[in-house]
Image (cartoon, helix red, strand yellow):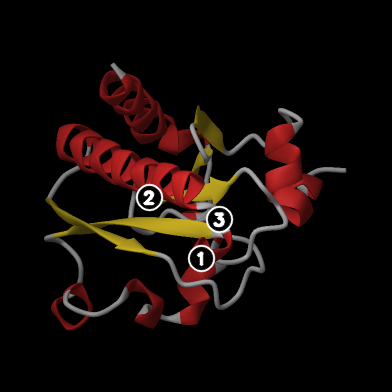
Amino acid sequence: MVGAWRDDRIGSALRGENPAVMRRLDAGFAVIGDVQFLPGYSVLLTDDPSVQRLSELPRSRRLAFLNGMDRLGEAVERACRRVETGFRRVNLEILGNADRFLHAHVWPRYDWEPEERVRLPVWLYPREMWGEERYALGARHGPVREAIGEELDRLAR
């Protein structure tokens, strides 16, 4: 079924069936976000679907997850600086309010964002933007996705 991987993001990643996966990291998967109103939005998924909170991981796995979050954040920063216009910074978040599995959001922020939004959390963008087709992940996001993957590889060396 098309898009069924979204119902089991981690399981599908473990099986090699999640098309959003850019790279496998030590304690999770770097994936490109479903919505791209801020080009380069990415997520770090845990590789253990039973883990809901960072504190549930043993210390070594917790540090590995946080290292992966740092690596993905730097990769998004480098990639967006290189291939996108008006890159400003990266915001990193572990929230856990909607999905019942550990994950970290990596949001690139841009100078071209509306002034009333640029200093606010991304979650305050209008709800309709999250579902608009023009912001859905697609082939046009290939260059930023490829650049993030390249930067993840560079940072692994």
Dot 1 falls on a residue whose secondary structure is helix
**Residue at figure coordinates x 15%, y 61% from the top left:** 112
Residue marked by disc 1: 55
User: Of the residues shown, which amino acid type is indicated by label 1?
Assistant: Ser
Where residue 114 sits, quadrant-wise, is: bottom left
> Quick check: 50 left or right of 126?
right
**Residue at figure coordinates x 39%, y 27% from the top left:** 149
Q: Where does the image place residue 10, in percent across and percent down from the top left?
A: 68, 46
Label 3 with label 1: CB-CB less than 8 Å: yes
Work out whether 27 lies above or below 66.
Answer: above
Work out whether 152 lies above or below 97.
Answer: above
**Residue at figure coordinates x 36%, y 82% from the top left:** 124
Q: Where does the image place residue 130, in percent across and percent down from the top left?
A: 51, 69
In this rendered view, identify the residue nearer to me: 5 or 153. Answer: 153
In this rendered view, identify the residue nearer to me: 17 or 136. Answer: 17
CA neighbours of label 2 inside 10 A, class few (<14), some (14 to 19), many (20+): some
Q: Where does the image place residue 50, in percent across and percent down from the top left?
A: 72, 57
- The span from disc 1 to disc 2 (Cα, nearest Å) is 11 Å
Residue marked by disc 3: 57
Q: Where does the image place residue 86, in percent across and percent down from the top left?
A: 12, 50
> Quick check: 88 left or right of 124?
left
- The span from disc 3 to disc 1 (Cα, nearest Å) is 5 Å
Task: Tell me the mark number nearer the camera, choosing from 2 and 3.
Answer: 3
Dot 3 falls on a residue whose secondary structure is loop
